[in-house]
Amino acid sequence: MEFVISRHTVISYDGESTAVKHAVGILRRDMRKKLGDAKQEENRIALHEDDALGREEFYIEAADELAVFAGGDLGFVYGLLFISEKFLGIAPFWFWMDQKIDKVRVIPVKYGRYSGCRPIIQYRGWFINDEVLIMKWKIDGDPAEPWRMVFEALLRCGGNMVIPGTDKNSKRYRQMAADMGLWITHHHAEPLGAEMFVRLYPDREPNYTQSPELFHALWEEGILAQKDCNVIWSLGFRGQGDCPFWEHDSSGCFDTPEKRGKLIGDVIELQRALVLKYVDHPILCTNLYGEIMELYEQGYLKLHEDIIKIYADNGFGKMVTRRQNNRTARLSAMPKKPVEHGGIYYHVSFYDLQAANHITMLPNSVDFVDRELTQVIEKNMTDYWIVNCSNIRPHAYYLDAIRKKWFGETVGDARHSREFAERYYQGSLSVAEMYRDYPKAMAPYGTQEDEHAGEQFYTENVRLLVHEIFNGKKEGTSRLNWLVGEHALDEQIQMFTDICRRNFANLQSYYRRCQKVSAALSGDKKMLFDATLFLQASIHYHCTEGVLTFGEGYLNYQEHEYKEAFLKFGDSAEAFYSADQLMRGAEYGVWKEFYANDCFADVKHTAYMVEKMMGYVRELGDNAGHDLWYRDAVYAPCDRRVLTLLVHDNHMTDWELYQAFKKKREQKGTLRKCCLA
């Protein structure tokens, strides 16, 4: 016997839950996408409460009706999305990975009971952080639709918790997230989801000891604004703008770890009391992030036992403290023994202005991620997992892997790459192989297993170096000490480019393999591959080219070979522009302008900065009239010294001049005949 899902199947729900209504709407939309016309009698999908189930539990009975039994709103949401995935075949990242949904007339469901897997992580979700792509992107003119699709994908993955954006975005979209059934929690730099002090008081120093009552009022207002939602209250005290508070304190009162730890502990206890004033049995957490982790491990920060302690990776997937500027302590972010009330903040995307990934995937393997997260589970840190997911689309592969860890699976590169390709690339084994080998192509910049470069390694450091050159820096920049140590600037540039050069043959081989895979694909499969994994390989490849030619140009510049430097800097800028153009070329259909606000890695601005180097060396090597290099680039050798007309064209911009030289270079070896009249 079979229950038949068709266009005539109705979803019966007369409850009041906004979250369940949202899920019903999603399933109805999926049925319209999947099901064609068929002559079927009307039947129904019905929702029934079962008090014996937990609030997130569900099961489905297929008989005369398709009955979803659940113990709470999220149970119904997961049950409805289970029908979408299990029976209709709609994958968790269907939207973000352009899943091709083929229509069928009907879908038969055998009579019987169905249920999903139980998660081993209690609160599990995403931090929509560094969301600069989706905050400016619109779907069909609607700026809120990208956020709905983020929250839908999270629910499809089995998530139940979200930090719904950063700063203003977190407040703008938290009601939408709550209405869809998600628990709300907060950025570690925005305790209790309260407004930032410096926004309300722009003319005052964000100094807690000087204005404690103002901070208290902000926190209380934040609690009152959210007390009717499901909230995991994040307690803590960092500075304004994701940095230690003592960086904004000029009093000198917090010059020791003891003083810093005591103030943070006192503030957290006060915040805890404020929450208890308005919320019965609240769920509380605090982030042991960066400097807070060090204070806690050293015993300077005391925390109440009912607070979930959230440990963090270093931004590259390794459970050690993150690098802070030039300080790389790499203290273990794992507790020494299993804990009660423990959790993690984990990154598949990161922004550190040094070497992290934002528009490309985590540069470390799924095997590596699995090892780290398995250790987390062994330490009983299963109360709370929040994953920095950035802008979703570039990171779907790793978000899908971590989704599996939420449910206790072991994940690895070999199996996960096959399963991911099966779902989103129509089973292409060659695409699976490219996903599997991606981390192997990433440049190592240090000796540790996680020290592989994201795209910021190229863009941030090239922009930094151009700035230092313009400012006449000779002794080197301290901002590169973390990477190459204290050396003169020319040595730092050489060492930085050498790191990229040592890996270039490996990266180039991977890039060319991606080219071959792309050439062998066709249709939707090719379009998706080119716009996702091949795009990311191309960003690494062209940005590395940009670094290497920048280094060559700098050597020419040092030798006062200004024309050669101009051309090499032009080659460098063109390489970065190529990466940017490939991103813009991936903006088909719904993805129109998705990469337009790439303002973190900002590949295009890196190109612009190198282009400014072209102008700088032109002023050193060309003449004041800007006609010497012009004549060399445009005129035949026999015409260069004929000055009856100084120039024949408008003066060229730096880029126009570079293009003229480039054309001449491409024609090198071609004989030109000079005809004298």
Image (cartoon, grey):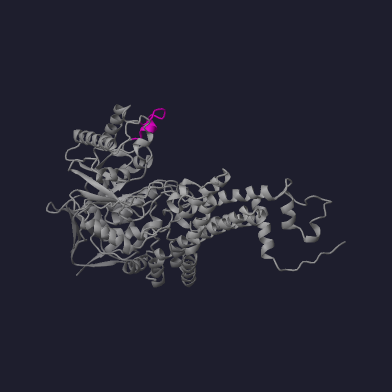
Question: At 68% from the left edge and 58% from the top edge, which residue is drawn?
Answer: 661
Front residue (pair 118, 568) = 568
| Part of the protein shown in magenta | 195-206
Front residue (pair 374, 121) = 374
The location of residue 239, given as percent across then percent down, is 35, 37
Quarter assignment of residue 60: bottom left
Image quadrant where one finds the C terminus: bottom right
The location of residue 669, given as percent across then percent down, is 71, 68
Taking 536 as reference, is 81 left or right?
A: left
The location of residue 152, given as percent across then percent down, is 32, 53
Front residue (pair 400, 604) = 604
Majority SS type along the magenta span? loop
Up-down relation of residue 667 to residue 597 (above or below): below
Up-down relation of residue 336 to residue 515 (above or below): above
Image quadrant where one finds the N terminus: bottom left
Front residue (pair 484, 544) = 484
